[in-house]
Amino acid sequence: MKKRLLSLAAILFVAVAMNAQTVKEEVKDDAKTVGKAVKKGAKATGEGVKDAAKWTGKTVEKGADATAEGVKDGAKWTGKTATKGAKATKKGVKNAAKWTGKTAKKGANAVSDTYKDVKDDIKKKD
């Protein structure tokens, strides 16, 4: 009975040892596979980052050029608009001065006429 138990234990031990060796080999192979995949992923990521950096640089450069052009066009437009505004203001001030002068004359004449009427009314009452 002892021999059988020892034989059974020996067979079981050998089976476990073989199974452990197989698992060890599988883990080793899996580790290699994962390592290769990580290397490929890192390489692809590096290339992706490199490409993205080039694209970002080109896009930033285009954006800077477009901004400079926009600022230049904005400055031209602002200059033209300011000139038009100055001319319109000058014309408006000139017209306002004419209107104010005419209105002031009318007001002065009206006051003068009223003064004369009042003076005449006072003479009539005396």
Image (cartoon, grey):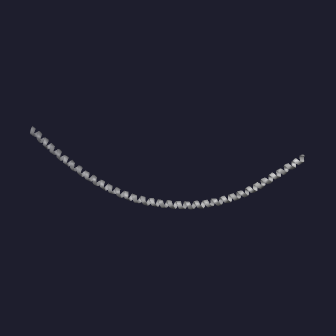
- Residue 97 position, x and y percent, is 72, 57
Residue lying furthest top: 1
Q: Count numbered badges in the picture.
A: 0
Please tell me which residue is depicted at 59% across the width and 61% down the height of the picture: 79
Instruction: Answer left or right for 83 relative to 24.
Output: right
Instruction: Answer left or right for 96 relative to 17.
Output: right
- Residue 34 position, x and y percent, is 28, 52
Compared with 3, 62 (above or below) is below
Say which quadrant the N terminus sits in.
top left
Q: Residue 47 versus residue 123: which sits nearer the camera?
A: 123
Please tell me which residue is depicted at 76% across the width and 54% down the height of the picture: 104
Compared with 93, 118 (above or below) is above
Please tell me which residue is depicted at 75% across the width and 56% down the height of the picture: 101
- Residue 28 position, x and y percent, is 23, 51
- Residue 116 position, x and y percent, is 84, 51
Q: Residue 16 versus residue 108: which sits nearer the camera?
A: 108
Please tell me which residue is depicted at 68% across the width and 60% down the height of the picture: 91
- Residue 52 in which image quadrant: bottom left
- Residue 9 in which image quadrant: top left
